[in-house]
Image (spheres, helix red, strand yellow):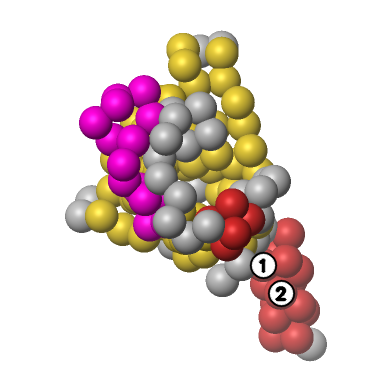
Amino acid sequence: MFRTTLIAAAALAALATPALAADPIGLWATPGNGGQVEITRCGNSLCGKLVTSNHIKTDPALKDIRNKDTAQRGRPLKGLQMLYDFTGGPKTWAGGKVYNPEDGGTYAGTIEMVSESQLKLKGCVVAPLCKTQVWNRLK
C-alpha cells in the first residue's frame, strides 16, 4: 500500500512540475507573410536563416533591397541570416542581433521559449523601444 501511494505521489509531483522549455533549434513560422526561419547552432550561439516567405515563393530571386548598407542590397533574401550571436539557454537566449529585411534594420534581440511549440522573439532599437513576435514551431 505504501509503495502504491509513493508511486502515485511521485506521478502527481511530475505532472505539477513544469518541464524545461524545449530547445529552439528547428523550423519556425513567423507571423505574417508566410515567413519561415530555421534556427540552428552556430558554434556556441544560436543563429537563424530565412527559409521562405510568401514574397520568396512568388519571386525566389528577391534581393535584400531595404538593407541600410547599400553594399548588401544585392544579396538574396532566401537563405539570409536574420538571427545571430544569441547565447544562454535553456529558456532564454540574449545578446543576439535580429535583422529585419522589411525595414533593413538590425536590432538587439532576445529569444524566450514559451513552450515546446512557441517562442517569443524580441528586437529592440533601444529599450523600451522594442517589438515582440510569437513564432510557432513547424518542426
How dense is the environment of label 2, judged by Cα within 10 Å: few (below 14), some, or many (20 and up)? few
User: Which residue is denoted by mark 1 in the rendering?
Assistant: 14
* Side (left or right) of 17 relative to 87: right
Q: Name the foreground residue: 81 vs 23.
A: 81
Q: Is mark 2 on a helix, strand or loop?
A: helix
Residues drawn in magenta: 67-81
* CA distance for labels 1 and 2: 5 Å
* Residue at x 37% of width, y 50% of height: 76
78 sits to left or right of 131: left
Query: Tags 1 and 2 in contact by the CB under 8 Å rule?
Result: yes
Left or right of 41 on screen, residue 107: right
The answer to whether residue 137 is above or below residue 44 is below
Quarter of the rendering containing residue 82: top left
Instruction: Give the quarter of the image for residue 14.
Output: bottom right
Q: Name the mark on residue 11.
A: 2
Whether the magenta-drawn stretch holds residue 69 is answered as: yes
Which residue is found at the position 47% from the left and 37% from the top?
Answer: 101
